[in-house]
Image: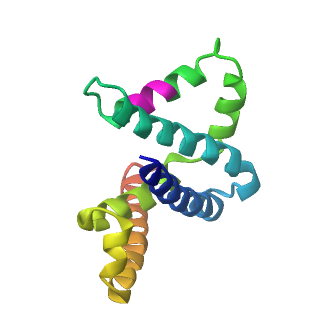
Amino acid sequence: MFKNIIEWFLILLVFGLSAIVGNWVGYDVVPSAAIPGMLVLILISVVGLVLEKVVPVNIPSVGYIGLIGILISIPWFPGSEYVVRWTSEINILALATPILAYAGISIGKNWADFSKLGWRSIIVAIFVFFGTFIGSAVIAEIILRMQGII
């Protein structure tokens, strides 16, 4: 179980760092402003993943993660104003790209299996990251221009 927690944390840390960079480049949010919110999101996710394994009720981890996120952001929860302020610095689209890229390469189940595929897979992953971002940007540009928003 402890090995899983470390692996989950490291994977989420990689996502968090790439999302912080995307947040900085795409939305002009300096990394120092986004780091506290990203750490909150990572901790919520790890706790949700642990609860899925520990609690005997058959609820997926995303249910626990959502429930924890809701509970700690409710105004009556101590410190919720900090959680809301910190996480509001992170744009949801900055999170989507690394998550979708990981979903695309997660066929191998985990990063250890992925690393066994060799350097060519890393190049493919980089193209997935860029392709997802550029494809999303092109679609958004077309839709927003058609609607006259930009």
Residue 150 visible in rendering: no
Q: Quadrant of residue 107?
A: bottom left
User: Looking at the image, which residue is at 39% across and 62% down?
Assistant: 136
Q: Looking at the picture, how far across and down is residue 139, in whole percent?
A: 35, 61
Of 45 and 135, the residue lying toward us:
45
Residue 108 in view of the camera: yes
Question: Which residue is located at x 30 percent, y 25 percent?
Answer: 56
- Name the one closer to the observer, 11 or 140: 11
**Magenta region includes residue 3:** no
At horizontal 50% and vertical 54% (from top left) the residue drawn is 6
Answer with left or right where residue 121 lies relative to residue 77. Answer: left
> In the figure, 52 relative to 77: above or below?
below
- Residue 67 is inside the magenta segment: yes
**Which residue shows up at 34% across the image and 86% down it?**
118
Q: Residue furthest top?
A: 76
Position of residue 120 relative to residue 36, above or below, is below
Residue 117 in the image: state x and y as whole percent: 30, 82
Residue 95: x %, y % from top left: 49, 53
Disc tally is: 0
Q: Nearer the viewer, residue 30 or 139?
A: 30
Q: Determine which quarter of the picture holds residue 114.
A: bottom left
Q: Main secondary structure of the magenta part?
A: helix
Which quadrant of the structure image shows residue 79?
top right
- Using residue 13 as the reference point, say whether residue 119 is left or right of it: left
Q: What are the residue bounds of the magenta stretch?
A: 64-68
